[in-house]
Amino acid sequence: MSPRNDLPGPALARKMWRALEPFHAVTYFAPESKAASDALGCKGWWMGYFGFRAAPLGPVTSEVVTATFYNFHPSRAARAVPDVWQIATPEQFVEARLRGVDGALRRFLGDEVIESAELAEAAELAGRASAGAQTAGRPLAAANAALPTPAEPHLALWQAQTLLRESRGDAHIAALVTAELDPCETLVMFAAEGNVEPDRLRTSRAWSEEEWAAAAARLHGRGLLADDATLTPSGSELRRWVEERTDRGSLAPWDELGPVDTERLVDLIAPFVQAIAAGGGFMTGNPMGLRPLSEKE
């Protein structure tokens, strides 16, 4: 399972995101990660989520978290931050995050794979790619880039993918801001495309029905949303533009790695990702609307 050599740049960037993202997802969806945040004293899943993801930024305020994560209602972050830093320091959250990921990956992959030459090679390739990840104007990427690389290959691979996905996420937010889509409008348009069930997306990000309806009305006024809450042709075109800009802003790592080693990385990581998905480490129907690569792609 390798990306085709004739894939244009933006399509390759999207394919690599789909190939690698499930390796990062254990950070939030594996029970080992939940146990690690519980051990720190976190109350509930969301406190662990915000603590783990925001920790590389340091002891930031809820306003900073809301701004950098972008699509959450301010109240969602405020229920966890800054209280989370009274439970444990950001440094302790970074350490606990790695402990949870370590336990999850060992369970999903098994000791033989963890100690394999193939995993070590994948970590080396992903590390080289992540060295090309852009961080200027990308706060979450920059914060993760400043962390030391773990010695264990499976954790080094996870950290490289974490940097790659946060760099992409920061690029996505830049595209949304340029498109003049506020956080709630962004979610309404994403749901209108049929990627995720609207109420599930709305409630997970803590937007009220009234706020969701107001965002839909604004989009309707711009000619982006139809009366039946689907995208108009102009809305579809804007969504395509946002995703293309995100992909273009995520190409640098794969230019850094080169086509041959990029193909090799996908081949190496495919069985790891399949094992994670089979073990329940990647949530289907996720808020990103992400489908992992299939064997035929």
Image: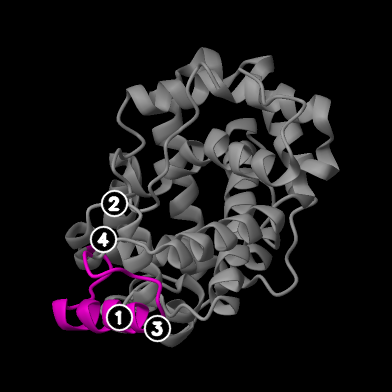
Label disc, if present, on residue 215 of the rendered structure: 1
Q: Is residue 11 left or right of residue 292?
A: right
Q: Are marks 2 and 4 in contact (CB under 8 Å)?
A: yes
Q: Is residue 53 above or below residue 121?
A: below
Q: Would residue 121 be found to the left or right of residue 69 on screen?
A: right
Q: Indicate which disc residue 179 carries.
A: none
Question: Which amino acid, mark 1?
Answer: Ala
For the point 48% across and 68% down, the residue is 54
- Pinpoint residue 151: horizontal percent, then vertical percent: 67, 38
The numbered disc on residue 201 is 4
The percent coordinates of residue 37 (x first, y second) are 32, 56
Indicate the amino acid at tag 4. Answer: Leu
Q: Which residue is mark 2?
A: 196
Q: Residues within 10 Å of mark 4 (few under 14, many from 20)?
A: some
Q: Is residue 224 magenta?
A: yes
Q: Which residue is mark 3?
A: 62
Which quarter of the figure is the N terminus placed in? top right
Quadrant into which the C terminus falls: top right
Query: Horizontal and vertical percent for residue 221?
Result: 35, 84
Does residue 233 appear in this view? Answer: yes
> Label 2 is placed on what type of residue?
Val
Is residue 45 covered in magenta? no
User: Is residue 100 shown to the viewer in this render?
Assistant: no
